Amino acid sequence: MEQQVDNILDKVMDVPGNIGCVLANSQGLCLGVKGNASEQSAGIIVAISDLASKLDPSSSAPVISLESNDKICMIHKQGITGAIYKQKGA
């Protein structure tokens, strides 16, 4: 399992513009982190994803995009919850 998580994180970080990523299980436990991201954010990322999915329970898991002046955080749940941090304009 650990090797699979590392492979996924490496693939995400190979995409130009990606500056960090976090993977978490359904309880908010960090499974892996790379780049400019914090394992402490894993629980918050899962909570945001769970709350957003309650907006329309009949649809599939939403993709949440949080933006600041220079960064974007995209959160999506597909079995496990992942967050990708991107540099704007890259």
Image (spheres, rainbow, N blue to C red):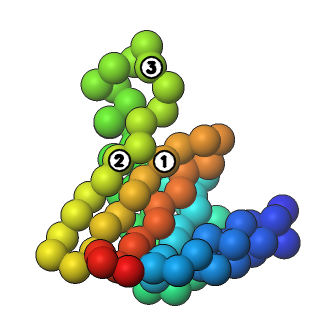
Q: Disc 3 versus disc 2: distance between alpha carbons?
A: 14 Å
Give x and y (percent) for residue 26. Answer: 56, 45
For label 2, the residue is 64
Question: Tag 2, which secondary structure?
Answer: strand
Question: Tag 1, which secondary structure?
Answer: strand
Whichever of callouts 3 and 2 sits on the residue coming sooner in the sequence is: 3
Question: Mark 3–mark 1 contact, CB under 8 Å?
Answer: no
Mark 1 crowd level (few <14, some 14–19, many ≥20, 10 Å Cα): many
For label 1, the residue is 76
Q: Is residue 10 visible?
A: yes
Q: Residue furthest top?
A: 58
**Residue drawn where x is 35% and y is 64% of the image:** 73
Q: Amino acid at mark 1?
A: His
Give x and y (percent) for residue 31. Answer: 64, 65
Mark 2 crowd level (few <14, some 14–19, many ≥20, 10 Å Cα): some
> Is 57 rendered above or below residue 52?
above
Question: Tag 3, which secondary structure?
Answer: loop
Mark 3 crowd level (few <14, some 14–19, many ≥20, 10 Å Cα): few
Give x and y (percent) for residue 20. Answer: 48, 78
Whichever of callouts 1 and 2 sits on the residue coming sooner in the sequence is: 2
Question: Mark 1–mark 2 contact, CB under 8 Å?
Answer: yes
Q: Amino acid at mark 3?
A: Ser
For label 3, the residue is 59
Q: Nearer the viewer, residue 27 or 57?
A: 57
**Residue drawn where x is 15% and y is 75% of the image:** 69
> Is 6 rendered above or below residue 48?
below
Whichever of callouts 3 and 1 sits on the residue coming sooner in the sequence is: 3
**Residue drawn where x is 32% and y is 36% of the image:** 51
